[in-house]
Image: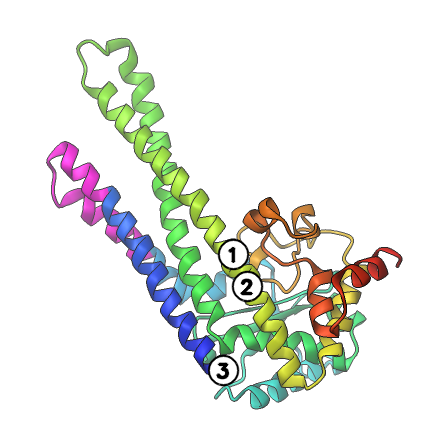
Amino acid sequence: MTFWEVQERNVRKSIILIAIFSLIMVSFGFLVDAIFNSFPVGMSIFSIIALIQILVGLSKGPEMVLKMVEARPANPEDFEEKQLINIVEEMTIASGLGQAPKVYVTEDETINAFATGYKPEKSAICVTTGLLKNLNREETEGVIGHEISHILHKDTLVMTLTSAILGAVVIIQILSWRAGLSMLRYSYPRRRKNSGLQIALFLLFIALLATLFAFLGRIVLFAVSRSREYLADATSAQLTRNPFALASALRKIYRVNKKKMKKANIANAHLFISDPLRRKINERKEGFFTNLFSTHPPIYKRIALLENKPPEIVLKELENL
C-alpha cells in the first residue's frame, strides 16, 4: 500500500466514523421524539449539537489545542528555533506538502511534539523547549518527519473529527445526567401524582447510553491513535532516509521524560509523539487491556521496528539505562 493510498483510506475512515457517530446522535434524538411524540424536536437538537461540535472542532480545534499548551510562534531570531523552522520547511519539501505548517514552541522541559490542523494549509507543528535543548538536528528531523506524516496522511483530520463528535456525546451525557438527577430529586416525593419521575428516569437512561457510547468511542479513538503512530514512524524514516534518527530521539524521550508535561491533559494527550501524561498503561508490554486503553504504542516496540531489532533486546537496553 502506497502512502497516498493510506491517505485516501484515512479520509474514508474519517467519513465513516463521522457518519456512524452522527447517526448515533440522530438516533438519540429519534428515541426522544418517539417517546414524547415530539418529532422532529429531539432529532434536530441532537443533530445541531453534533454539527456545532464538528464545525467548532474544524475551525477552532487547532487554535484551542495550541492555547491549551500555551504555545507561541517559533522565533526566527533564536538559533535553535530558526533551525527548527528550517527543518520543518525541509521536511515539507521532502513530503510533497504544498505549504509548510506553522511552527510553535511551548515551554516545557520534557521532549515532545505534536501536529494539529485538518488540512495542510491550516496545520501547525508544536515542539517543547525540552526537545530543542536535548535533541540534535538529525533527531529533530526524525521527530518533525513523524509530525509531518500526521498531516500528510490526514491523521489530524481523523482525530479532530472523532474528538469533536465525542465531545458532542459528552455534552449530551452531562446535560442528561444533570437534568435527570435534578428532576429525580424534585419528582420522587410526588411520584404517584407526577409524571416527572418517568421523564427523569428516561433522561438518566439517555445519559447511561451516552456514557456507554463515549466509552466505546474513546476506545476507537485510542486504537486510531496507536495505529497512526506506527505509520508516522515509518513515514519519518522514509522522509529522512534515516530510521535511526527517530529511534535515537525516542530513546532520549524514554530517558528524559520522567515527569508529566505540565500543560498537557487527557483531551490532547493522544496528539503528542509520546504520552505527555506518562501513564503506565502506555509503557507496558502490549496486551488485551493495554491495547484497549493505551493511546501510544510502547516506545521500546517503536524503536525495535525502526532499528530492526527484537523488541525484547530493546526493552532490556532501555531498562538498563
Query: Which SS class for mark 2?
Result: helix
Is mark 2 in CB contact (under 8 Å) with mark 1? yes
Looking at this rendering, what residue extends furthest in the front direction? 310
Can the viewer see residue 256?
no
Which numbered disc flags the more N-terminal residue, 1 or 3? Answer: 3
Q: Residue 2 got which mark? A: 3
Looking at this rendering, what residue extends furthest in the right direction? 320
In the figure, 248 relative to 87: above or below?
above
Question: Is residue 141 shown in magenta?
Answer: no
Looking at the rendered structure, the kind of residue marked 1 is Ala
Residue 185: x and y in percent read 34, 17
Q: In the image shown, does 289 or 131 lie closer to the viewer?
A: 289
Residue 4: x and y in percent read 46, 82
Which residue lies under the disc numbered 1?
Answer: 223
Magenta stretch, residue numbers: 29-52
In the figure, 166 relative to 243: above or below?
above
